[in-house]
Amino acid sequence: LGWRISEEEFFKDNVSFINELKFRYGFGITGNQEIDNNAIFNVYVTDYPNTAYDIDGSKTGNLPSGYKLIQNANPNLKWEESMMSNFGLDFELFNQKLYGSAEYYIKETSDILILPPYIATLGEGGNQFINGASMENKGFELSLGKRSSFSNELQVDLNANISLYKNKITKLPSEVINAYGGNGADQNILGRPVNSFYGYVADGLFRSEEEVVQHADQPGKDIGRIRYSDLNGDGVVNADDQTWIGAPHPDFTYGFNANVSYKNFDLSFLLQGVSGIDVINDFKYSTDFWSVSETGSNKATRLLDAYSPTNTNSSIPAISLTDSNFESRFSTYFVENGSYLKVRNAQLGYSFEEDLIKKWGMKSMRIY
């Protein structure tokens, strides 16, 4: 839904700096196309190769092998639903030299479909799709461009954009609390961004016997080992000291695009970046430890810089044949800042004069 009005209609007093002004509003409700209908509603699968039954009654001789239960039906299941509203503005000003758009949106998703883990006592086929949490996204996007003509030979078009959003879980049914992280009690995902990281806080390495002695009871602690924070202050480092340690949602994303032409030459490039996002570096399990993931393969050269009596300034734990300090636990040691700025594309080109190439039977030719 949009509304557009010309400058002649909008400005009666000869104010002419607006070339185009468009207000937009949109509203819609959709489902989730990533959820497979068969995954939700099919509760049986052919499985037994050593038996044969004419279950379909077709008497064709192609007999199915039998069926087994792989998941339970849920008579209370509802479709996931996303409701979105957006408000936008498009504009061109000053003889189309300044242009851009701005948009604000709200997206509310309810009854998210999930397949949570189930207790082993239910036996084989205990899977059941259920409606889980609800969440909210609020975001803003801005794009601004400037066209400049310094002469008939030099033209410049610059465009920058930025977008940001905030995500949080707004509803968390009690039966799905454990499916979204946390400890299932006082620390859960409610009010936090979806897929937030939950784990231990790694507070550097033990570098002296005094630090080891003064620290809370932590099985396997020793010089050169990772020191984990005793967050609740009970003198013991255990599962109760886990907390929320990151989120895979950026503070904002941004980009910058430039197109410059001078005579027959043209230059363009695109920069794109992300700021304030947490990422999990799974490679560290193999690059920073000898025994955390497995011991049967070669390791990365980072281990050559591991902590040792002659290399006490290292941030990489000392090499050990066993993981007695439980350093395979998920902690801030594996969470890193994933912000970046990339040159996505850069191109320099030259277009030949038509008079020069027409003798070769060509209308245009450009090298870049």
Image (spheres, grey):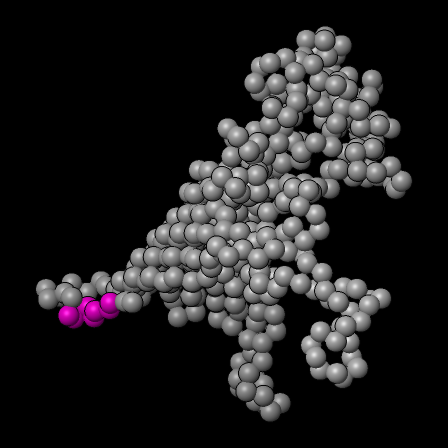
| Point 16% across, 63% down: residue | 15
Q: Describe residue 17's horizontal placement relative to residue 284 as left or right.
A: left
Left or right, 335 with respect to 260, comes to: right
Name which quarter of the figure residue 311 lies in: top right
Q: Residue 343, percent across and down?
A: 58, 54
Give the quarter of the figure containing the C terminus: bottom right
From the viewer's side, name the closer residue of 127 and 213.
127
At 63% from the left and 45% from the top, the residue drawn is 117
Indicate yes or no whether the magenta region holds residue 335. no
Residue 253 in the image, given as x and y percentages of width and height: 48, 49
Q: Quadrant of residue 349?
A: bottom right
Question: Would residue 167 be visible to someone looking at this image?
Answer: no
Part of the protein shown in magenta:
3-9
Residue at image position (48%, 46%) is: 133
Work out whether residue 261 or residue 192 is closer to the camera in this orientation and state it.
192
Q: Is residue 237 visible?
A: yes
* Image vertical order of residue 72 relative to residue 366, above or below: above
Residue 79 pos. (x, y %): 47, 59
The quarter of the picture where the N terminus appears is bottom left
Using the image, determine if residue 257 lies above or below residue 184: below
Between 293 and 21, the one lying in front of the other is: 293
Taking the image as shown, residue 20 lies to the left or right of residue 304, namely: left
* Residue 340, image x, y percentages: 57, 45
Q: Nearer the viewer, residue 298 or 142?
A: 298
Labels in figure, total: 0
Residue at the right extreme of this rendering = 296
- Please report the residue visible at 58 percent of the width from the left and 80 percent of the height from the top: 365
Left or right of 204: which side holds 48? right
